[in-house]
Image: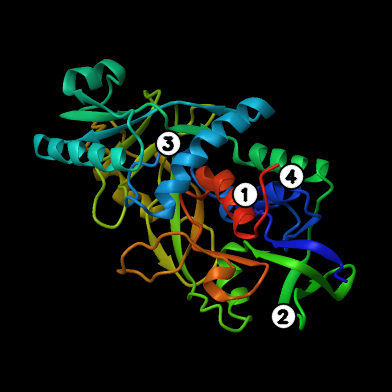
């Protein structure tokens, strides 16, 4: 007899989404979170963009779950009063030579099921965003922004309503398979001390820590973890834009793009800085490289108008210079452990994909939708 039916390690947006889906299917679910607040790592340090599913390779989990998750997320937020806005995005070509790339992007997006992109001429683009100086653009009307913390509170609320719970300040130190079935999770709590909990099923949704935890179970072939920091800079004053602005993607990333929060305050980023620790301070000097990139599509950006804002660290499972990795979601068919689902490398578009990933975890454990 186990202490709980299903344990989820990690109360980020994906862990909470999985816990919500599992609890709605009738499982007794407990989520273990090492911090004193839900979603205080990757889920709290991102651009809060609801992505359309444009750039990811056709057939990848990122493409599939982003497109599925986007629609589920909009519906969930509307039904539960989570602040969000279907604000739209322009992917802009800075010069005539990049116009062909916009057509290529639209074709790739269509292969992913994103069929609402609209090619705009220079004049059509400037009619929407007069402050731009571009040769043309691709409009993504289904891109949006969301209050990520409000979303996570709503997910936690549904989990609680279904009889589940989140246990904070609980650090998982060790996991082991139990002879005869199930898992024992050894934890450390600053108040309760060290103890263990057994469960029939285990979901490892621990972000940066997932590879190290998964590796503790024989045969999981867990990947190595890498850290890629993304720095954001805030624009002093109000931006003359009402949509998100992305340049044509460049090798290794999406370029320096402009996002807006729900108050329409503009920020630029993130860049990519490979690191070896969790130092979240933003080096003001990194902003110096942003100006030239931004002025390719917004030449009126004033000197000194970018100030350090915040940073996030992507939970990578490939090293610098290697091809980008897809989400890796390993169920029993992959590693042979009954009742185990391990999630690795859940970076962007993890926020957009969260509800779809949560339902996929439920399916991998053989449960039916509520």
Residue to which mark 3 is pinned: 259
Q: Quadrant of the N terminus?
A: bottom right
Asked if marks 2 and 1 touch (Cβ < 8 Å), the reply is no
Provide the residue designation for mark 4: 24
Q: Earlier in the sequence, mark 1 or mark 4?
A: 1
Give me the C-alpha separation between circle 1 and circle 4: 16 Å
Q: Closer to us: mark 4 or mark 3?
A: 4
Instruction: Choose the circle earlier in sequence order: 2 or 3.
Output: 2
Q: Tag 2, which secondary structure?
A: strand
Task: Kindly identify the residue that appears in the image at 56 percent across and 82 percent down.
Answer: 219
| Numbered tag placed on residue 215 in the rendering | none
Q: Separation of disc 2 and disc 3 at Cα?
A: 43 Å
Judge whether residue 48 can be spotted in this image: no
Residue behind mark 2: 176
Q: Does dot 4 land on a helix, a strand or a loop?
A: helix
Of circles 4 and 2, the one toward us is: 4
Q: Nearer the viewer, residue 290 or 273?
A: 273
Local packing at callout 1 (Cα closer than 10 Å; few below 14, some 14-19, many 20+) is: many
Instruction: Look at discs 2 and 1 and give the one toward the viewer.
Output: 2
Sequence order check, earlier mark of 2 and 1: 1
Assess disc 3: are there few (<14), some (14-19) or many (≥20) residues with their C-alpha within 10 Å of its C-alpha.
Answer: many
Closest to the camera, between mark 1 and mark 4, is 4
Number of on-image labels: 4
- Identify the disc placed on residue 13: 1
Name above or below for residue 120 compared with residue 258.
above
Spatial separation of the CA atoms under disc 4 and disc 3: 34 Å
């Amino acid at each position: 007899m186990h202490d709980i039916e299903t344990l989820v390690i990690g109360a980020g947006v994906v862990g909470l989404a999985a816990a919500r889906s599992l609890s709605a299917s009738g499982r007794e679910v407990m989520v273990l979170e090492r911090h004193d607040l839900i979603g205080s790592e990757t889920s709290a340090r991102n651009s809060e963009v609801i992505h359309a599913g444009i750039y990811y390779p056709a057939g990848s989990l990122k493409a599939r779950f982003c497109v599925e998750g986007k629609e589920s997320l909009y519906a969930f937020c509307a039904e539960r009063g989570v602040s969000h806005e279907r604000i739209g995005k322009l992917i802009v070509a800075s010069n005539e030579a990049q116009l062909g790339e916009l057509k290529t992007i639209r074709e790739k997006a269509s292969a992913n099921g994103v069929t609402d992109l609209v090619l705009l001429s220079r004049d059509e683009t400037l009619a929407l965003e007069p402050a731009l100086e571009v040769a043309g653009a691709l409009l993504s009307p289904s891109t949006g922004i969301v209050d990520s913390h409000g979303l996570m509170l709503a997910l936690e609320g549904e989990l609680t309503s279904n009889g589940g719970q989140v246990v904070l300040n609980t650090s998982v130190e060790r996991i082991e398979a139990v002879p005869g079935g199930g898992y024992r999770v050894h934890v450390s709590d600053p108040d309760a001390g060290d103890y263990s909990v057994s469960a029939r099923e285990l979901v490892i949704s621990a972000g940066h820590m997932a590879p190290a935890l998964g590796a503790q179970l024989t045969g999981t072939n867990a990947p190595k973890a890498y850290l890629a920091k993304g720095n954001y800079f805030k624009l002093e004053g109000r931006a003359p834009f009402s949509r998100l602005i992305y340049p044509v993607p460049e090798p290794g990333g999406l370029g320096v793009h402009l996002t807006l929060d729900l108050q329409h305050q503009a920020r630029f980023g993130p860049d990519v800085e490979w690191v070896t620790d969790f130092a979240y301070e933003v080096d003001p000097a990194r902003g110096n490289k942003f100006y030239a990139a931004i002025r390719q599509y917004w030449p009126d950006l004033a000197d000194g108008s970018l100030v350090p804002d915040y940073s996030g660290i992507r939970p990578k499972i490939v090293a610098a210079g290697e091809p980008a990795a897809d989400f890796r979601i390993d169920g029993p068919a992959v590693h042979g452990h009954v009742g185990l689902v391990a999630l690795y490398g859940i970076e962007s578009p993890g926020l957009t994909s969260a509800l779809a990933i949560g339902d996929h975890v439920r399916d991998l454990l053989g449960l039916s939708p509520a």
